[in-house]
Amino acid sequence: MSHFKDVQAQFMAHIKDPDHIAAPSDIEPRRMAIYSELFFNNIEGFITSAFPVLKSLYDEDDWLVLVRKFFIEHNCKTPYFLEISQEFIEYLSHQYQMTTHDPIFMLELAHYEWVELDISIRDEDESYTNFDPDDLDITPLSLSHLAWSLSYQFPVHTISPENQPQSIPEEPSYIIVFRDLEDEVGFIAINGMTALMLQIINENPNIKFEALCEALQSQVQSLSLDIIKQGAVSILTALIEQGVLVTQK
């Protein structure tokens, strides 16, 4: 049994790093090469599909080096392909050492793309439902399970090969990533006030409109409660119509 485990460990080590770790001697090299290529291509293909914008910022060789480092260095804790993207985020956050080939916004862009994937495959929370914006005054408000309010140092929603910021902007970017009523994933760029409003809702599920505005006014005392209510109505109405805000059944 010990010999079998040793062979198994060498088999997996060679598949991860075939250029530096020898294959088991009793496996035909041609077959071993097929196994190695198959495993790596599966991992690379899934990461490419999960992070298409990030991938577009690299030349092919540099991208393959990045994925290979992930394959070699990170011990995935899940057998599910759909969760490999989260493992990649874990790797970039805690193990990976950035190089000159990596954009300075690498981690934030990767996280944003992972959020889009995560939202796209989430199951709906059936304990919540959409409601009529006309009932805003009386309906408890919650952030949809299919929406995520985020803030980043970089404008990750605008990044492309032609648009790559070289320094941290003076103002952060606030974004809602959500799945709409047609199950399409999209985003909304919002301002700091709307982000604060959504933070209050997220921390206080089923909050009513009046209580929300009072909580917001306590943090933005330069604005009167009446002014906050007037601005909140149009913002919240739009978010309700897009399915970002829901209520408990």
Image (spheres, grey):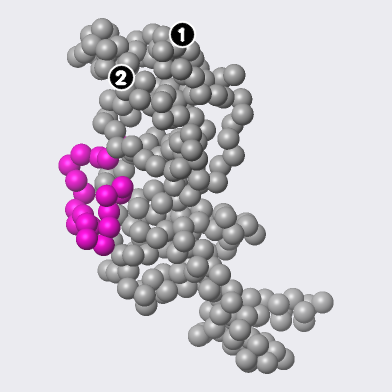
Using the rendered view, name the quadrant where residue 231 is placed: top left
The residue singled out by tag 1 in the image is 138
The span shown in magenta is: 156-174
Image-quadrant location for residue 127 = top right
Q: Residue at 29% across / 69% down in the picture?
A: 101
Question: In this orientation, which residue lies closer to the viewer: 102 or 237?
Answer: 237
Q: Dot 2 corresponds to which residue? A: 234
Front-most of residues 145 and 108: 145
Question: Residues under labels 1 and 2: Cα distance?
Answer: 16 Å
What's the residue at 27%, 40% (across, down)? Answer: 173
Verify whether residue 171 appears in magenta.
yes
Residue at 56 percent of width and 70 percent of height: 42
Identify the amino acid type marked 1. Answer: Ile
Query: Could you classify mark 1 by the number of other residues whose Cα lies within 10 Å: few (under 14), some (14-19), or many (20 or more)?
Result: few
Residue farthest toward the front in the current orientation of the protein: 182
What is the magenta segment's predominant secondary structure? loop
Which residue type carries mark 2?
A: Ser
Return the x and y of residue 29 as percentages of the image width and height: 63, 92
Q: Secondary structure at mark 1?
A: loop
The image shows residue 197 at horizontal and vertical percentages of: 35, 23
User: 150 or 8, which is in the foreground?
Assistant: 150
Number of numbered discs present?
2
- Residue 243 visible to an observer of this rendering: yes
Q: Are marks 1 and 2 in contact (CB under 8 Å)?
A: no
Above or below residue 5? Residue 124 is above
